[in-house]
Image (tube, grey):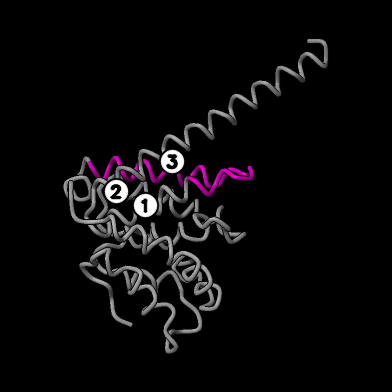
Amino acid sequence: MKAIYGRDMAQLSAELEAQFLADDSPETFSLADVLALAGERTFGFLFVLLSLPSALPVPAPGYSVPFGILLAWLGIQMAIGSDQPWLPKGWRSQSIGRERLSGIINAALPWLKKLEILSRPRLIAVCRSPVGRLVLGGAVTLMGLSMIAPIPGTNTLPAMGIFVVGLGLLDDDGAIALLGATGGVVVTASIWGAIIWGGSNLVDLLKRGLGQ
């Protein structure tokens, strides 16, 4: 399997099918395999692939917490200016079976193909400049942390935001990347605001119940 360099987003769906759904694809894929495939745009490719399970309308269970932690870690690295992500050896060796991965990708392809129609290189500085990558990396970090929250419904929308940011990075489409980052941060802020507000109200109710 060859590395993916200089990807045009209009080809991403075809490349995912060729790399992960072909009959001669390996039975399992490790994170190290994905890093080797991603080529020069590792962050965008990882954002897309790792957010997929939670971004789908019917998310696959069991991925939000570990992938949310990993996405937050990747977002931090991108924000501080890293060109390539650093991941512990144990994380690189984690693998997923082709059958399970193919189910996720097949479910995502119709949505991806619709987004491909809208994407084109624009506002390239957002994807490549230090300031732009700081903003996008910070947004991904916040959204990744939100995916970890043990509350139903708090992981799908932030994961969708990360997915859109990743697509924008892959095609140097700063407009799409900013759309994903802005929408995701607004949703994330709303989620955490609701958690904090709900927590404070719960404390008040307990105090009143105890006569304090």
**Residue linked to disc 1:** 164
Q: Are marks 2 and 1 in contact (CB under 8 Å)?
A: yes
Q: Earlier in the sequence, mark 3 or mark 2?
A: 3
Q: Which is more toward the observer, 163 or 29? A: 163
Of discs 3 and 2, which sits in the foreground? 2
Q: Earlier in the sequence, mark 3 or mark 1?
A: 3
Q: Position of residue 209 (x, y in %)?
A: 82, 16
Is residue 207 found left or right of 5 in the rendered image?
Answer: right
**Residue linked to disc 2:** 176
Q: Position of residue 158 (x, y in %)?
A: 47, 45
**Residue linked to disc 3:** 142
Q: Earlier in the sequence, mark 2 or mark 1?
A: 1
The secondary element bearing badge 3 is classed as helix
**Does the segment drawn in magenta span residue 135?**
yes
Q: Position of residue 188 (x, y in %)?
A: 48, 37
Amino acid type at circle 2 is Ile
Is residue 132 found left or right of 1 in the rendered image?
Answer: left
State the separation of the CA atoms marked 3 and 1. 15 Å
Structural crowding at the residue carrying mark 1, measured as other residues with C-alpha within 10 Å and reported as few (<14), some (14–19) or many (≥20): many
Span colored in magenta: 132-157
Amino acid type at circle 3 is Leu
